[in-house]
Image: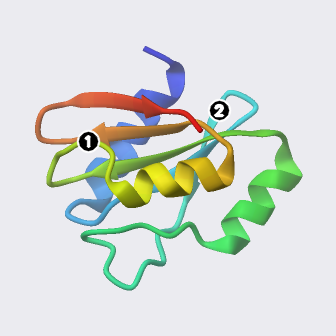
Amino acid sequence: MPDFRCEFEQHALQQAPQEACGLIVNGHYWRCRNIADDPTIDFALDPRDYVAASMAGKIEAIVHSHPMGGGASKADLRSCAYTRLPWHIWSMPDDQWLTITP
C-alpha cells in the first residue's frame, strides 16, 4: 500500500461524513479543504490549497473519499479526464481503493 493511503484514511475518518480530498505531491499526501456546496456528496478542492501544493512540488494525483461507499461517479470520471491526473478514491464502508486514470 503506498504511503499516502494511511495518512489519507486518517484524514477521511476525521472528515466523515463529508468527503475528504487531497493531492499527491512528490509522492506525499497533501491535505486539502473540501469547499463543495454539499461536501457530504461531492468535493471541490480549495484553489488556495491547490496553488500551495503546486508551489511545493509536482502534483501527481488527486485523492478523495466516498464516505457512503461506491466507485467512481460519472462526475469523477469526467473530472479525472479534465485534470489529466490519476484519481485515487477510497470507498470507506468496504475499505476499498480504486484508481482511475485519464
Q: Is residue 46 above or below residue 80?
A: below
Disc 1 designates what residue?
A: 71
**Image spot of residue 47 (x, y percent):** 68, 72
**Image spot of residue 90 (x, y percent):** 32, 39
Circle on res. 28: 2
Q: Residue at x 84, y 42 (%)?
A: 57
Name the residue type under label 2: His
The answer to whether residue 20 is visible is no
Q: Residue at x 42, y 49 (%)?
A: 64
Q: Earlier in the sequence, mark 1 or mark 2?
A: 2
Q: Residue at x 52, y 21 (%)?
A: 3
Position of 24 with respect to 93 (left or right) is right
**Image spot of residue 32 (x, y percent):** 56, 60
Toward the top, the furthest residue is: 1
Quadrant that contains the C terminus: top right
The foreground one among 5 and 86 is: 86
Count of marks, rendered view? 2
